[in-house]
Image (tube, helix red, strand yellow):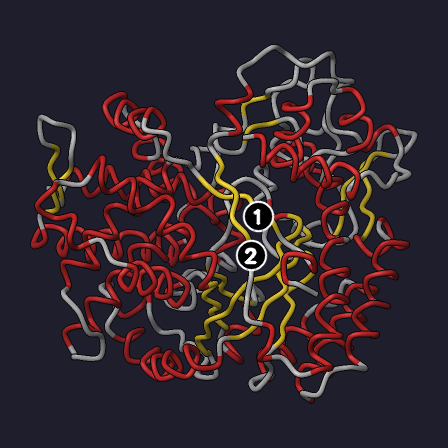
Amino acid sequence: MKNIVAMLALMVLATSCKNEKTKEEVVSEEPQETSQVDMTKKLNKYVSVKLTSDISKLTENGRKMLPILIQAAEKMNDLFWYEAYGDKDALLNSISDADTKTFTIINYGPWDRLDGNKPFVEGVGEKPLGANYYPKDMTAEEFKAAEIEDKNSIYNFVRRDDNGKLYSIPYHQQFETEVKEVAALLMEASTLAEDDGLKAYLELRANALLTDNYQPSDLAWMDMKSNTLDIVIGPIETYEDQMFGNKASHEAYVLIKDQDWSAKLARFASFLPELQKNLPVEEAYKTETPGTDSDLNAYDVVYYAGDCNAGSKTIAINLPNDEEVQLKKGTRRLQLKNAMRAKFDKILVPISEVLIDESQRNHITFDAFFANTMFHEVAHGLGVKNTINGKGTVRESLKELSSALEEGKADVLGLYMVQQLHEKGEIDGDMKDYMTTFMASIFRSVRFGASSAHGKANMIRFNFFKEKGAFSRSEDGTYKVNYDNMIVAMKDLSGLILKLQGDGDYAGVEALVAEKAAISNELQSDLDRLSASNIPVDVIYEQGTEVLGL
């Protein structure tokens, strides 16, 4: 823990820049002195990992560009702090306990992201469902009835004027100073880019940050193929908005492509149309054609910032989220190989040694973990983006429940695709490896907490699979996979989720979440055994130019 505290003490200094925001924009009450909770236990939920990569493979210009991209990425931290909480400095300055301050930095606020967003700083209260995207006293009904410009835009805040009327303010106006700085850095990096596609993308992304028009840069990003350096930056995922799932959060990843691994994965993109046709659901729910320009790539991630760095850390990415871009160009699936390996070695293997039946532990493999994670991202591009009955997009019709169901779809369809490609002889290895590793991964992801979309998705799958007899629990508290039943459960749950999405069935999804997204006492006792064994829940990163030796 001391190493974590020391490392994050530097982060306190690095993230202490003052944001001039109005008082109405702070989402919590003035915090009181921190409670005397056992922060050692909370901090021990994380294990520190160095994010490194072989930068000797970069050109001279690439090595010059990398620190500039990291500098641009780092600025996403303050933007996400504001979106998730409000006045970061006021909160951190109110906390005297060093460990509590460290834990606050990890969570980008005073709520424990791995424990259902429970507050751990006295006086802040429950986390608002709308985070800081909306006035904290705004109700869902008030928002629905209000006449607000670009009401459903994912790139604006909702605020209240002096007369109490709701209005919107675009991100590029709220963050005018910050996005100008980031745009300038991206333009500086573009002058060093030797890859034409990367150069064009950086220039368009810089403009997007200044205008909130991200589609041209998303299209350029999909056209970019031969680059080694990459940066994913801007307001992207909508998980933080748990009121409507409708406001995007700022984040950034700085990436170095592993060209050799990426070449091995490239051929899987060609199977997407066939996989779409073979989905285990009625024809009406698979009429959309996934973009054939999708690609699969492996990367070393060398910097996380903002949303993706809060609480549980992403190990694979599927972007862009723009449905029009997806239908036209497909998506890019980025496998974060070094981050994935860290979680496998430090978390998944130890979990399997406690909760997986001894006779099946030999089926826990990194290759299976990598493939399951990769095809989870592939599965995001399959199914339907628009409802089949005129209710608009799936995201619009399912609102705040869309993220959890989409993650559930990707998980189970990912395994379905592994099974399909394995039958075709396109994937090597024992299918038992993929299914057993999949089972162990449920326990890993469930520990992220019921408040996250991934946590809800994993609990739905766990309880659905349990009802279908896909696994059994022994008297010693270990779990054994029934491989035949898991195949059946996998197909049944895939069909159910795809139908709920295609129908835009909000009530049906709400019932599914209410019934199956809860952690039973028995499962909680098993998860508690993992904590008692000092198995971390997730990672925090030592990252940046010094770690890379720049």
Left or right of residue 3: residue 157: right
Residue 12, position as x, y percentages in the image: 75, 36
Q: Which residue is mark 1?
A: 541
Query: Please, what is the three-letter code of the amino acid marked with disc 1?
Result: Tyr
The residue drawn where x is 63% and y is 72% is 230
Residue 275, position as x, y percentages in the image: 28, 74
- Rendered-image quadrant of the N terminus: top right
Q: Residues within 10 Å of mark 2 (few under 14, many from 20)?
A: many
Residue 308, position as x, y percentages in the image: 58, 50
Residue 332, disc: none
The residue drawn where x is 74% and y is 20% is 95
The residue drawn where x is 16% and y is 28% is 477
Q: Which residue is mark 2?
A: 51
Residues tagged 1 and 2 counted as in contact (Cβ below 8 A) = yes
Residue 511 or residue 427, whichever sits in front: 427
On screen, 327 above or below 245? below
Dot 2: element: loop
Query: Please, what is the three-letter code of the amino acid marked with disc 2?
Result: Leu
Residue 463 or residue 344, whichever sits in front: 344
Q: Image quarter for residue 512?
A: top left
- Between the residue at mark 1 and the residue at mark 2, the CA separation in whole angstroms equals 6 Å
Q: Image quarter for residue 112?
A: top right
Left or right of residue 418: residue 472: left
Left or right of residue 183: residue 347: left
On screen, 2 above or below 272? above
On screen, 346 above or below 132? below
Dot 1: element: strand
Residue 516 or residue 223, whichever sits in front: 223
Residue 176, position as x, y percentages in the image: 88, 55
Residue 438 or residue 361, whichever sits in front: 361
